[in-house]
């Protein structure tokens, strides 16, 4: 057994793996499935999922979604018209409003989460040891 330093992947090998992971995670079929099941665009479903976790201020929502505050206002207006969210006064800042999910919004978020939590079929082909190894690798990549 060699006691030398561990060999590192090349930049192109790492990029190839990253692109494959991105393709799996950003799968357009999954996004389309969420949109069809919820009746709103994937982006709107994402916003409702954020809001359903806990009420957020408009600025927090904009920051989480990576959009400008005026766009967050338009988005929340649309979601409110659909009965998915409502605004309420912020408990400690009377200038701000909190956005919270309605029962209908929470139901939509649960449905989207169910779809997004369903692994791609290829994961079923992996044996438990392979899944454990993949989990260890991904945990190491996330927290080097």
Image: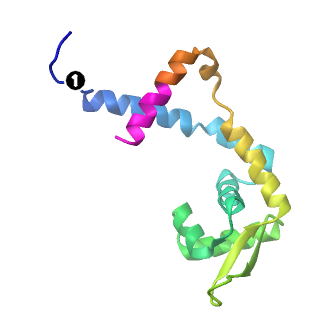
Left or right placement of residue 5 versus residue 65 in this view:
left
Corner quadrant of residue 52? bottom right
Would you place residue 91 above or below residue 10 in this image? below
- Res 39 visible: no
Identify which residue, 111 or 29, lies in the foreground. 111
Residue carrying label 1: 6
What quarter of the picture does the N terminus occupy?
top left
Left or right placement of residue 63 versus residue 119 in this view:
left
Corner quadrant of residue 78? bottom right
The reply to whether the magenta stretch includes residue 139 is yes
Residue sitting at 68 percent across and 68 percent down? 55
How far across and down, in percent of the image, does residue 92 sit?
63, 85
How far across and down, in percent of the image, does residue 27 sit?
59, 36
Q: Which residues are magenta?
A: 134-144
What quarter of the picture does the C terminus occupy?
top left
Residue located farthest toward the bottom when viewing the structure as drawn: 94
The chosen color scheme is rainbow
Label 1: few (<14), some (14–19) or many (≥20) C-alpha neighbours in 10 Å: few
The dominant secondary structure in magenta is helix
Residue sitting at 63 percent across and 27 percent down? 120
How far across and down, in percent of the image, does residue 26 sit?
55, 40
Would you place residue 36 above or below residue 104 in this image? above
- Res 108 visible: yes
Identify which residue, 89 or 120, lies in the foreground. 89
How far across and down, in percent of the image, does residue 21 sit?
48, 33
Left or right placement of residue 94 versus residue 11 in this view:
right
Residue sitting at 59 percent across and 68 percent down? 61
């Amino acid at each position: 057994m060699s006691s030398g330093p561990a060999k590192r992947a090349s930049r192109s090998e790492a990029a190839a793996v990253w692109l494959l992971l991105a393709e799996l995670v950003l799968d357009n079929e999954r996004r389309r499935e969420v949109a069809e099941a919820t009746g709103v665009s994937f982006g709107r479903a994402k916003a409702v999922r954020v809001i359903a976790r806990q009420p957020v201020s408009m600025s927090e929502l904009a920051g989480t979604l990576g959009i400008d505050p005026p766009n967050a206002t338009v988005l929340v207006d649309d979601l409110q018209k659909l009965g998915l969210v409502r605004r309420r006064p912020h408990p400690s800042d009377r200038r701000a409003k909190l956005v919270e999910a309605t029962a209908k919004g929470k139901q939509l978020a649960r449905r989207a989460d169910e779809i997004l939590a369903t692994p791609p079929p290829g994961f079923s082909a992996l044996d438990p040891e392979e899944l454990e190894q993949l989990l260890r690798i991904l945990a190491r990549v996330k927290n080097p």
